[in-house]
Image (cartoon, helix red, strand yellow):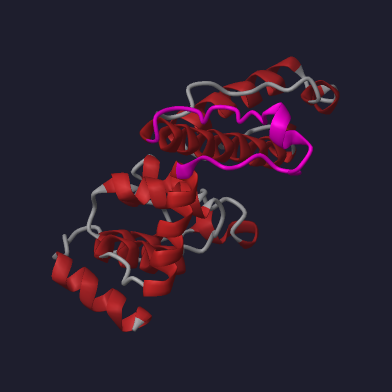
Amino acid sequence: MALAYVCLYLSYRESLEPYSMEERGRLVTAMMDYQATGEIPAFPGNERFLWPTLRSQIERDIQGYEEKCAKNRENGAKGGRPKKQTVSAETEGFSEKPKKPKEKEKEKEKEKEKENKNETPSEREIAFRRFWEAYPRKVGKEAARKAFAKAKVDVSLLLHAVQEQRKSEQWTKDGGKYIPNPATWLNQGRWEDKLPGSTTDRNRIRTPEEYLAGIEEDYT
């Protein structure tokens, strides 16, 4: 579930003091539009100088929310929040830490077995690693992995979109400052964006085989 609100922190009040009411209104509207669509607004006034700071905070809020949702889903799959452990009066004086439940011990043993076996990663995990290696902004890796699993899109198309969008003005401006977080990019289906400044021939639809051929040339 996407974040359905924008946080207006009290600390913004001091930063907004120098701006007119019209500029403040445009900033608040831009925050809501960016949260909903991910589009970078064009500002006619001085509010453009404050926008990068507000945008960075919005992205941090989105990332924190996505990570919290992912953690809640994991806890839900395990049967909810773990119960608090209690230490009996008899053992309290003889042990600094309470004994862990048997289930947790078994989970640890399974994790160790997996590490020892050096299990081969799944095809989808390999595909995610290719995407992560290609995506220029490496933040929120676990949130990106969850979003990638839900995307259900061939990795060759994602890699092609990344390759083309990284040439656009939005992704190259100010050293990549305006590149979306990978989880946001995936959750919002941004691989379908047609950004100005990219070099893709939009008049011809390439086949997946053509996408893959061009991408593998760069990543093999």
140 magenta-colored: no
Q: Position of residue 172 (x, y in %)?
A: 55, 61
Q: Is residue 220 above or below residue 9?
A: below
In this orientation, does residue 167 appear? no
Q: Where is residue 47, by image quadrant?
A: top right
Q: Residue furthest front?
A: 90
Residue for point 57% across, 22% down = 29
Q: Quadrant of residue 19?
A: top right
- Which residue is located at x 60 percent, y 34 percent? 61
Secondary structure character of the magenta stretch overall: loop
Answer with left or right where residue 55 lies relative to residue 38: right
Residue 60 screen position, x and y as percent? 62, 40
Q: Is residue 96 magenta?
A: yes
Which quarter shows the C terminus? bottom left
Q: Residue at x 40, y 66 (%)?
A: 113
Q: Position of residue 15 (x, y in %)?
A: 82, 28
- Total numbered labels placed on residues in the image: 0
Image quadrant in which you'd find residue 26:
top right
Q: Nearer the viewer, residue 142 or 103?
A: 103
Asked if residue 202 is positioned above or below residue 56 in the image, the reply reads below
> In this image, 193 relative to 89: left or right?
left
Q: Residue at x 40, y 35 (%)?
A: 78
Q: Would you place residue 219 above or below residue 169 in this image?
A: below
State the residue in front, 112 or 28.
Answer: 112
Range shown magenta: 78-102
Residue 211: x, y in percent?
22, 69
Quadrant, the N terminus: top left
